[in-house]
Image (spheres, rainbow, N blue to C red):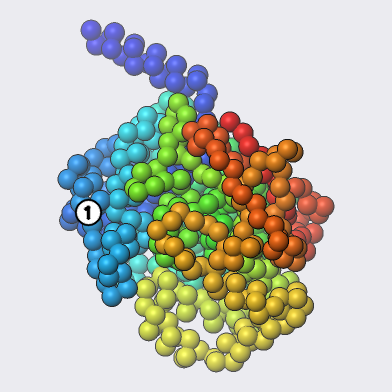
Amino acid sequence: MMFIVCTIVTELIEEKAEDGKEMTDEKLALLEHITYIDENVLKAAGIDKELLEVKDEKSVVRILKIFDDKALDNLRNYRKKTLFNIGNEEKQNIVDGALISGKNWANIIETIKNDEELKNLVVKDSEQITTKKGKKYNLQICYQDPFSKQGIITYKGTTGYEEWDDNVKGISLKDTPCQDNALKFFQRNEKSFDDIVLVGHSKGANKAMYTTIVSDSDKISKCIGMDGQGFSNEFFKEYEAQIEKHGSKITNYSVDRDFVHVLMKQIPNSEQKYCEAYGVQKWAQFHTPFSMFKSQDGKMELNGSDKSPVFVNTNENRYTALLRKFTTYLMDKGKPEDVEKIVNYIGPFVGDFLGNGSFLKAIQQAKGSNFINLIRIFKEAIQFSKTENVTLKDWRGFFRTFGLKDTGEDNTESIDNQQTVYNVKTDENVIEYPTLESQDSLKSKKIITEQRDPYEKKYMFKSHKPEAETINQVISIEQPQWDVECER
């Protein structure tokens, strides 16, 4: 009897392995959320633990077993009232940390537990981190697909003071300590697999992209990033050959108004895709890992026979792109010694404000540093505005972009409706993304969103190839325009 059972199981595994169907990028992005299940999420679920236990040889469904029906209901009904969310139950439902709502967390966990591909993944290795404030997180996790034997490594986004400081300093370094740590985690697991996929959000995406390039490993078949920031000029000069070889493995998805993917320069032969945001209640949520999943009222849309989540692709917001242009300007036109001083000034401030959650300490840090560096930043911004013909109206639009007039709507329009561009199906099925200079021409033209069956169509991007194809030329490449195509 036992022999018969083992034979059936073996045949099922072989059949699944021979199926050869790749897990969708959206599913891989959903898996990344496990690294974000921290003490905040556990407490909101009524679970008295500091950290989700991720143990070797445990399946994903066993790891998430701690979230029973009661815990999921606790997440859906979670409320945290503050002076800033009085009378707004949607904002009260937002869980600290990744800033994902409780009802969305319940949906994420439930979906992963029920997904045939995700729930059976087995943990092979993991690494935890304890911040200066004593908070614990699952920093990176290595899984194995029991059927295909493929390895999947997920890297968590920025965690604590050190990593925020590391983010900023990456503008002038070819390698940072956090990137090197991510590379070493990959290298200690590389020998266990013939095929590996890397996934990450925010800094985790940057780590995944960095590892894809610097490891120079042919075992990495693809890299999926979400809202991942770019790299320094020093990085491009050092790893030119590896970028030419491995850059095309990278796809980086970003919410159109995300404010992190625009920092520094993206890998030139990677694919950059922009997505509409859903469920955003405040500006910081444009950078949450779940905001790019098409969802409504705590329920994400699942599409196709494999029940994959959905990204709805759009154009990058013109004002968000302005931040990239300024960052690139600093990298290319600023004096190296001035850029280094600015970075050393901003790094600790951002580390305390975003990493430690202490605005007062961040202000003290900024005041304690050389005030001349703040003046340097303003001088560079003024010079940038003159050189690139950036007006005060552009800067006002930049700051207004992260505001929402109607916070109850799933909306990624620019505040200036005259400058909004939507996905649209034309006769040629192509529209161009307007540049900062050309978008004013849209003032007298409104493009209407196409009515579409969400279960039948997905909107995808492909980028125009920039004329510059070498790493040496990427320093001066303008942001590419985009085509939009509709596919099943």
Location of residue 39 with respect to 300 vertically, above or below:
below
| Quadrant where the image shows the N terminus | top left
Location of residue 154 with respect to 7 vertically, above or below:
below
User: Residue 369 location in percent, x, y?
Assistant: 50, 89
Q: Residues within 10 Å of mark 1 (few under 14, many from 20)?
A: some
Q: Nearer the viewer, residue 311 or 470?
A: 311
The quarter holding residue 143 reads top left
Q: Nearer the viewer, residue 475 or 453?
A: 453
- Residue for point 24% across, 52% down: 75
- Residue for point 51% across, 44% down: 311
Q: Residue furthest right?
A: 467
The quarter holding residue 341 reads bottom right
Element type where label 1 sits in the image = loop
User: Residue 440 location in percent, x, y?
Assistant: 72, 65
Left or right placement of residue 255 versus residue 93 in this view: right
Tell me the amino acid under the disc marked 1.
Asn
